[in-house]
Image (cartoon, grey):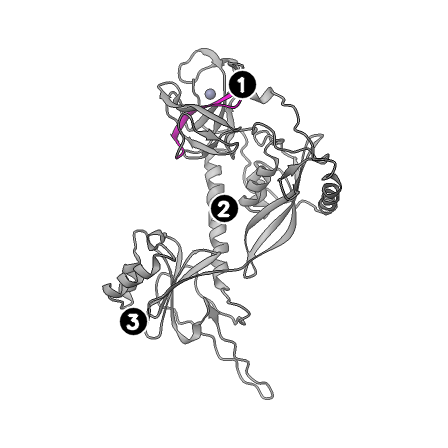
Amino acid sequence: MNLKSLRQSFNRFYTGKRKTILRGTLTGLIGTALFAGWWFSSDSNGIQQSVGIEPPKQELGALPIVQPTLKYGFALDTFQVFENTIHNGAFLSDILLRHNLSYVDIERLASNAKPVFDIRKMQAGKSYTVLTKDSTQRAEYFIYEPNVYEYVVFHLQGDMEVTKVERPITTETKTSAGVIESSLWKTMTDQGMSFELADKMEDALQWSVDFHHLQKGDEFKLVYDQKFVEGKEVGVGKVSAAIYKTGEKEYYAIFYDNGKESGYYNLEGRPMKTSFLKAPVKYSRISSYYNLNRFHPILKYHRPHYGTDYAAPYGTPIMAVGSGTIIAASYTSGNGNFIKIRHDETYETQYLHMQGFAKGIHAGTHVNQGDIIGYVGSTGLATGPHVCFRFWKNGKQVNHLSLNFPPAEPLSEADMPAFSQLRDQYLEMLKNVEPKFVVESEDADTSGVARVGNP
Ligand SMILES: [Zn+2]
């Protein structure tokens, strides 16, 4: 997978997600209201749409059943409805002035909105709806949807109230399985799963599976929570169980919560979480290994490469692989912006060529494993965006990919009966999941991307 297809995958994901959200808004129902067929064009561009349903044809012996079309708690067929998305650089006032509100009204509305919703946070591309009785008159309601989970109703009459409504979320346990065709997320999105699910699976297995070394033919199976709003899939909750099979090896992650602690455990009840993550960036590709005799791409001579390079797009978050204290957050001409973390008396890690540091990150900051410390860049001696990751053991740089750390302590005897029961339940569910195979239409490029290098 190269950077181009990586971006395409991102785009595909976001486009796909946006469609889901749009579909989600189509069936905005409040409470137990009945839903009657209602349609609007998702690429509406502000043109007034006559919304309303054809009255059911009355037939002899059949009584008409009138079902109001409800959305945001309003009977839409009694209004003229304008559906649109916020344009780049547009303000609430621009929209409302077009619908015959005065500046005084808008100011009052903005001040009423303050405790409920910050109108400056309206984003380009998000949906809004204007309800009016007559387009030549002042609009009655403006409804903004910051996300699929909630919407904000601006009452444009009377007290000019502003209210936020949260849509109830329900979850359902689901299972999924797949076989790696090229990259993890390409496989998952091609097989009808979401990027978000790939992300959560990576979270569950990040300590045991090196996602930079996936093999064609690797298999995975998952038990996870699917979130729904008004009957539409809106996101992935927790991954409860995961199996990842690569070659002869199988890795298991079972989520267990004993009320005090929670996390992922292997089949024997040992925590999956180890002192260090396998890599400091997700969805990246190793572009250069630790190598004591490497030909340097910029300097054009052989010299040791004491790190592992992870190529990823500019701005990709870089995580602390373990908890510790930042001992350097600075700049040199070779390293560019870099961070060094001391984890304990033995280990330190270092991250080079960053675009910038995360907020609040400086020498002396304590960080936890997985905290974002900065963003991928190409500062210093680097030909492309990547992070050069260096692992120090007792003051010497070592190859972290060849290190083995002792396993963590298992769950207590008292936890084991409950854990085993849960584990067996998940394993039974996983046993029955079959991967969905799809025919690869694209050329699966696993050969690599534009060369990146660094000191
Ligand atoms: Zn490097």
Which of 236/103 is in front?
A: 103
Q: Splitting the image into 4 quarters, where does residue 406 fall? A: top right
The numbered mark, 2 or 1, whose residue comes first in the sequence reads: 2
Range covered by the magenta-colored residues? 340-359
Whole-number angstrom distance, CA of label 1 to CA of label 3: 69 Å
- 1 or 3: tag closer to the N-terminus: 3
- Residue where numbered disc 2 is placed: 13
Q: Amino acid at mark 1?
A: Glu
Whether 349 is among the magenta residues is yes
Q: Earlier in the sequence, mark 3 or mark 2?
A: 2
Percent position of residue 437, x then y: 65, 44
User: Closer to us: mark 3 or mark 2?
Assistant: 3
Q: Do labels 1 and 3 touch, CB within 8 Å?
A: no
Left or right relative to 338: residue 30: right
**Disc 2 element:** helix
- Disc sitting over residue 345 in the figure: 1
On the image, which quarter does residue 169 sit in? bottom right
Above/below status of 172 relative to 8: below
The residue mark sitting in front, 2 or 1, is 1
Quarter holding the C terminus?
top left
* Residue 138: image tag: 3
Q: What's the residue at 45%, 26% (across, down)?
A: 387
For the residue marked with disc 3, what is the amino acid? Arg
Instruction: Determine if the magenta segment contains residue 302.
Output: no
Residue that extends furthest to the left in the rendered view of this protein: 103
